[in-house]
Image (cartoon, grey):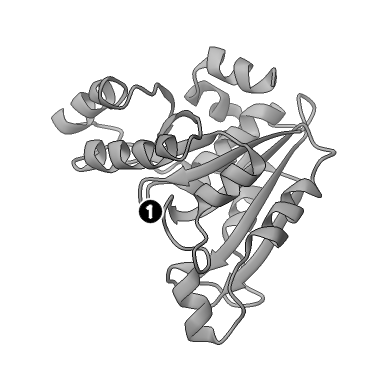
Amino acid sequence: MSVIVVTGTSTDVGKTVATAALAATLTGGDGRDASVAVCKPVQTGVGVDEPGDLAEIVRLAGVRDTREVLRYPDPLAPETAATRAGMAPATLGPIVAAVRELHDHDHVLVEGAGGVLVRLGPDLTLLDVADALQAPVLVVVGAGLGTLNHTELTVGAVTDRGLRVAGLVIGSWPAQPGLAEECNRTDLPRLTGVDVVGVVPEGAGAWDRDAFCAAAPTWFVPDWVQSVRSV
C-alpha cells in the first residue's frame, strides 16, 4: 500500500476534484489498473446524512472503498467546528488506524481539510497525519493571483517538517487563462522547486463519471503517474 496525502494551499482550490482525478487516473477509470481507496479524516459543513467530499469522489471516479473518520456540521476548521458542536475533537490515532485499515489497496489517498496547517484537532494538523504515515504530500494550488505566495508557504511548511512534496496540481485551470495564470504556471516550479504534475480544467467537477474518468489521465504528467504506480 502506498499513501499520498492531498492538501490544498487554501479552501476551494479544487482539492476534492483533484483527488478524484488522481484516483480515476490510477484505476484507469474502471478499477482494473490499480486498487485505490480514499480516506477523509475530517469532514466539516455537512449533516449526519448529507453527502460530503467522499461522495463527490465516488460520483466522479467510482472509488469503491472510502473512509470518513469524523464529521462536524459547521463549515469551519475542524477544531473549531468540533468545539461549537460540543463533539470530541479529532485525534491522530483513529485517523492513522482508518488509513491502515485500507492496506489491501494498492494506493490510498488521504484528503485533508483546507490548508496544511488547518487544525484538525488541538495541536493536530495534516502534517502530523502525513508524518505518522510517512507519506508524501501532494499540494493542490490555485491558478490565479496569490497562488505563488500561498504555494511557497505551503511547500515550506511541508519540507520544514521533513516531509516530501510529491508535486503540485493546479486544481482549476480556466478555459481562457489570463496573463497571471500563464505566468504562474511557469513560476510555480521555479519558485518552489516542485514540479507541476497535474492541471485540472475548470468545471471538471460538474462532468459525469464517464467523461471525467476518460479525461483525467490526460491531466497528469505521465512519468509522474508511473512513478506513483511503481511505489
The foreground one among 6 and 96 is 96
Is the residue 43 above or below the residue 66 in the image? below
Residue 191 percent coordinates (x, y): 25, 25
Count of labels in the image: 1
Q: Position of residue 168 (x, y in %)?
A: 42, 30
Amino acid type for the residue under numbered disc 1: Asp
Task: Please name the residue that numbered disc 1 is placed on.
Answer: 12
Considering depth in this image, is 209 or 129 the residue closer to the camera?
129
Image quadrant assignment for residue 200? top left
Give 124 or 167, whichever is nearer the viewer.
Answer: 124
Q: Residue at x 61, y 17 (%)?
A: 227
Q: Determine the residue located farthest toward the bottom in the rendered image.
A: 86
**Residue at coordinates 57% horizontally, 24% vertically from top-left?**
217
Mark 1 lies on a secondary structure that is: loop
Residue at left offset 53%, top offset 85%: 85
Residue placed furthest toward the left: 179
Q: Residue furthest right?
A: 104
- Quarter of the image with the N terminus is top right
Answer whether residue 5 is visible to the viewer in this image. Answer: yes
Q: Residues within 10 Å of mark 1 (few under 14, many from 20)?
A: some
Quarter of the picture holding the C terminus? top right
Percent coordinates x, y for residue 222 in the rendering: 55, 15
Q: Is residue 84 above or below residue 193?
A: below
Is 37 situated left or right of 220 in this image?
right
